[in-house]
Amino acid sequence: MEGKEQLDRARERIIETIAQNIDLYGVTPSAGRLYGMMYFYNKPITLDEMKEELGMSKTSMSTTVRALSDLKMVERVWKKGVRKDLYQVQEDWYQSFIDLFTTKWDSAISMHTHALKKSLSEMKQLISDEHTSDEIKELAKIDIEKLEYIQDYYEWLNRVVEAFESHDIFTLVPKKEKE
């Protein structure tokens, strides 16, 4: 087929770039290769077909597909008459980024907010306790200011996450419209 070799080279370059950068999503390069291969496959694919394309074991394929599915980068689809599970890539890269970004930051914000509230409460108790030395009270007051600053940051970060989830981010940074 005329041009097939050049097309394959161009695709392989993108697949390898995805594999090298997929660690940003917390998955392995092999998951990036699988995602890239599926992206160019242009139709839903079974685990057996994936295994054949990439030469990985079916167990490894299954684990990798599950990781990509958890990131909402790959989804299972149904096709009439096909008994095996079929998978296809989630082609909306904007939404994939939003899902990853918001999931990770929601978790971090929640963890930090919980720790901040607990530490602020303990420090305020120290300040109000008549048995606490003046030196410790002063240090606690300084620390409270620092923690309130951090708390303001996480409240701001939460609004950033909400801007992604609501897609308001696209008002600030519009997607390029397809021609």
Image (cartoon, helix red, strand yellow):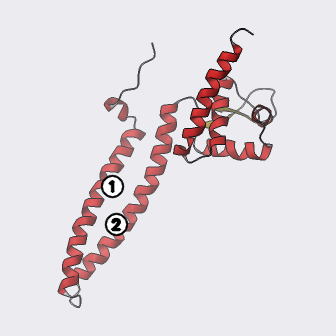
The residue tagged 1 is 154
Q: Is residue 17 left or right of 131 when viewed as pictured?
A: right
User: Is the C-beta separation of discs 2 and 1 under 8 Å?
Assistant: yes
Helix or strand or loop: what does disc 2 sit on?
helix
- Quick check: can you spot residue 128? no
- Measured as percent of width and height from the top left, residue 65 is found at 68, 41
Residue bearing mark 2: 116
- Describe residue 71's horizontal placement relative to residue 53 as left or right: left
Please give the name of the residue rendered at 19% of the width and 84% of the height, measured from the top-left corner. Answer: 135
Compared with residue 39, is residue 103 higher up or lower down, i.e. above or below?
below
Q: What residue is rendered at 56% in x and 41% in y?
A: 22
Q: Residue at x 23, y 83 (%)?
A: 136
Reply above or below: 1 against 93.
Answer: above
Label 1 sits on a secondary structure element that is: helix
Residue furthest top as drawn: 2
Q: The C terminus lies in which quarter of the figure?
A: top left
User: In the picture provided, is 57 more to the left or to the right than 123?
Assistant: right
Dot 2 or dot 1, earlier in sequence = 2
Q: Where, by quadrant of the figure, is residue 17 drawn?
A: top right
- Please, what is the three-letter code of the amino acid marked with disc 1? Tyr
Q: Quadrant of the N terminus?
A: top right
**Residue that sits furthest to the bottom in the current view:** 131
Graded by Cα atoms within 10 Å as few (under 14), some (14 to 19) or many (20 or more), the crowding at tag 1 reads: some
Residue 130 vertical placement versus 64 (above, below)? below
Identify residue type, mark 2.
Leu
> Up-down: is 140 above or below 75?
below
3D distance between C-alphas at marks 2 and 1: 10 Å
- The image quarter in which residue 130 lies: bottom left
- 81 or 4: nearer the eye? 4
Report the side of 15 relative to 151 (left or right).
Answer: right
The answer to whether residue 136 shows anywhere in this view is yes
Residue 16 place in picture, x, y as percent: 61, 33
